[in-house]
Amino acid sequence: MKIPRVIIDTNVLISGLIIPKGSPFQVLRLWQAKKFELLVSSNLIAETSEVLRRPKILKKYNLSLELIEGFLQLIHLYGIIVFPTKSKVEVRDDKDQDILDTAISGKADFLVTGDDDLLVLASDTKVGKLNILTPREFVEKMNK
């Protein structure tokens, strides 16, 4: 079986890093175990970096800049950078267009998200073979 190509939404990446339990954390553990290839875009990396560096997030989760830099470096080193082109699929929230375009341009097998504006597209035939799943659904599917 080929290794799946997966794009993880910013909300899942961040939750997996700052909360060391639960489905988002398990998604990152699956990536660490090389169970899938991680697809990323420069916008996704920039958004992840920006959110993690917010003073409120740094303080609330007691994050160090070293931890954040290390995490972003892992994504740069081991993620596959995709340069997305605009897809024909429209999303309800314009902020989600980049991740969907990256998933489609990168021929992702899965898009893992907790965002309802993306999850609603799971049954849309325009996304082709892209499976849009919650972190829990993805972990269950990968552990079968």
Image: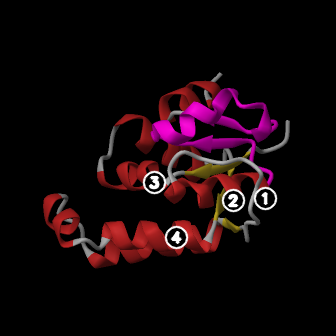
Name which residue type carries label 3: Leu
Residue 9 appears in the figure: yes
Instruction: Report which residue position mark 2 lands on.
Output: 102
Q: Amino acid at mark 2?
A: Thr
**Along the line of sight, the residue nearer the viewer: 128 or 16:** 128
Circles 4 and 1: CB atoms closer than 8 Å: no
Per the rendered image, the range of residues in magenta is 107-133
Position of 126 relative to 15 (above/below): above
If you read the primary sequence from the N terminus, does the residue marked by circle 2 or circle 4 appear first? 4
Which is closer to the viewer, label 1 or label 3?
1
Instruction: Residue under label 3, please give it.
Output: 13
Please give the residue where the numbered disc 4 appears in the rendered image.
45
Q: Marks 3 and 2, how far apart in space?
A: 16 Å
Residue 42 percent coordinates (x, y)? 59, 74
Q: Amino acid at mark 1?
A: Ser
Determine the residue located farthest toward the top in the rendered image.
Answer: 144
Quadrant of the drawing holding the C terminus: top right
Task: Residue at 50%, 59% (x, y): give it.
Answer: 95
Q: Is residue 20 magenta?
A: no
Nearest to N terminus: mark 3 or mark 2 = 3
Q: Position of residue 52 (x, y in %)?
A: 32, 67
At mark 2, the secondary structure is helix
Given contact means CB atoms under 8 Å apart, are the residues at marks 2 and 1 in contact? Answer: yes
Q: Residue 81, how many percent across, how many down?
A: 69, 70
Which residue lies under the disc numbered 1? 105
